[in-house]
Image (spheres, grey):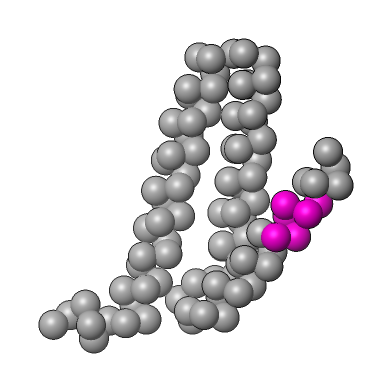
Amino acid sequence: MIKFNKEWHRNADDIARYLSKANPYWNENVLKDMLYTHLKLINEQVVFRLKKDWDAEIKAIDVIEEHMLHLADILSGGIAKQFSKKFLK
């Protein structure tokens, strides 16, 4: 399990690095933090599912959804800033 956790985080590092180079308004450390949080939340949800703790899993999914909406705001905000002339017509 630890092996896969390291690979997951290495992948998150790669994604954050790639995205921050693609858009100057996406901060690599902010993206890395968001992706690490996502991995933590997914891991918690899986544990609840394995324990068949359905109420806790539903709550975990709600937290994940809220977190992903926040990430979507960060990403879309960066796109709007990078291509502001296209959005301000």
Q: Is residue 50 above or below residue 33?
A: above
Q: Compared to 23, does 38 lie above or below?
A: above
Q: Is residue 33 left or right of residue 77?
A: right
Along the line of sight, which residue is nearer the eye, 13 or 27? Answer: 13
Q: Tell whether position 9 is magenta.
A: yes
Q: In which quarter of the view is residue 86 placed?
A: bottom left
Q: Is residue 10 magenta?
A: yes
What residue do we see at 75% from left, 60% from top?
A: 10
Identity of the residue furthest to the left in this view: 89
Q: Residue at x 42, y 62 (%)?
A: 74
Q: Could you tell me residue 79's position as x and y percent?
A: 37, 73
Q: Position of residue 81 (x, y in %)?
A: 34, 77
Please, what is the dominant secondary structure of the magenta stretch?
A: helix
Total tally of numbered discs in the picture:
0
Start-end of magenta stretch? 6-11
Observer-nearest of 1 and 16: 1
Of residue 14 and residue 88, the one placed in the foreground of this image is 14
Pick the quarter of the image with the N terminus.
top right
